[in-house]
Amino acid sequence: MTALTLTADREGERADALLARLVPDLTRSAAQRLLERGAVTSEGKPVRKNDRPAPGQRLEVALPNPEPIDLIPQDIPLDVVYEDGDVIVVNKPAGLVVHPAPGHPDGTLVNALLYHCGKSLSGINGELRPGIVHRIDRDTSGLIIAAKNNKAHLALAAQLQDHSLARTYEAVAVGGFKEDCGTVNAPIGRHPTDRKKMAIEQKNGREAITHWSVLARYPGHTHLECRLETGRTHQIRVHLASVGHPLLGDTVYGSKKPVPGLAGQCLHARRLRFVHPSTGELVELECPLPEWFQKILRNIDR
């Protein structure tokens, strides 16, 4: 059993929504089951799922011991950039899916981490699994961090919440930018008609902020650096498309015509910075642009 303490930070939010937001990998339904079992208390009294804790109110949560999941460890090569007893950071190649999903039951980063890490895994959601702290799209390459234990997972998830876990990407966008830098601040939510897509949603979206700066200008394209202040699904892709500059090769939010030699959007998670969950030291990591990205830059510089 893993015990953790949470502090309510929003006015009027239901307890089940609060748990799902603050506990990594905990779904709304899983949060409701914990509340129904009396596993969440405040000052010794059980909290109900429709209770609305006041800001500053402390909740004690008893998470179940992790149970094995029905996933097969697979010996898939990993480009490990950093690893110790608490965390592992991998340079994910484009095309590798992070989590098993319909259509991708195996051959994922999770399968590879199960093989590589063995029993050294976090189990925040009651499952024995590599603690993927944040995700990147299948066709996006670059740095992704996973936690090896619950303490590290919770600490890194807290850094995601307060924006101290910094992620910087490089991208090639279509078109030219007049300014050298800027910010897109627009809420993102599920597309109202196409549930596989995300969209700018002023009413039902969640806060999303992307800072961008120009690295180089090419005829018809711009090489950008993008820093995430928040981490919504498809955030960079949706934000840049919303200002008229979709990512090169993004057939979901940009042109439907594929780019020769490019399997998906031209996006690479270049740098990662976080506070180590055990030592408190600042860890700053960087991985080079992959050859396919460099080739794209050479091709548009003509």
Image (spheres, helix red, strand yellow):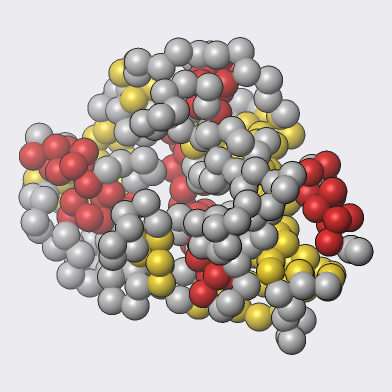
- Residue 249 placement (x, y as % from top left): 64, 55
Residue beneath the point at 77% across and 81% down: 180
Relative placement, left or right, of 157 versus 67 is right
Q: Is residue 117 visible?
A: no
Is the residue 108 above or below the residue 137 in the image? above
Residue 175 vs 92, above or below: the answer is below
- Image quadrant holding the C terminus, namely bottom right
* For residue 105, side relative to residue 92 (left or right): left
Image point (59%, 33%), residue name? 96
Query: Quarter holding the N terminus?
Result: top left
Q: Residue furthest front?
A: 257
The location of residue 65, given as percent across then percent down, is 30, 23
- Callout count: 0
Q: Relative to residue 168, is residue 205 depicted above or below?
A: below
Query: In this view of the protein, which residue sits in the foreground, 116 or 194?
Result: 194
Query: What residue lies at 61% left-to-right and 26% top-to-bottom?
Result: 85
Q: Examine the rendering and report whether any part of residue 208 can be seen.
A: yes
Q: Position of residue 139 (x, y in %)?
A: 60, 43
Horizontal relation, residue 249 to residue 253: left or right: right
Name the foreground residue: 65 vs 199: 199
Q: Quadrant of residue 226?
A: bottom right
Residue at x 28%, y 70% (from the top left corner): 204
Residue 122 % position (x, y): 45, 28
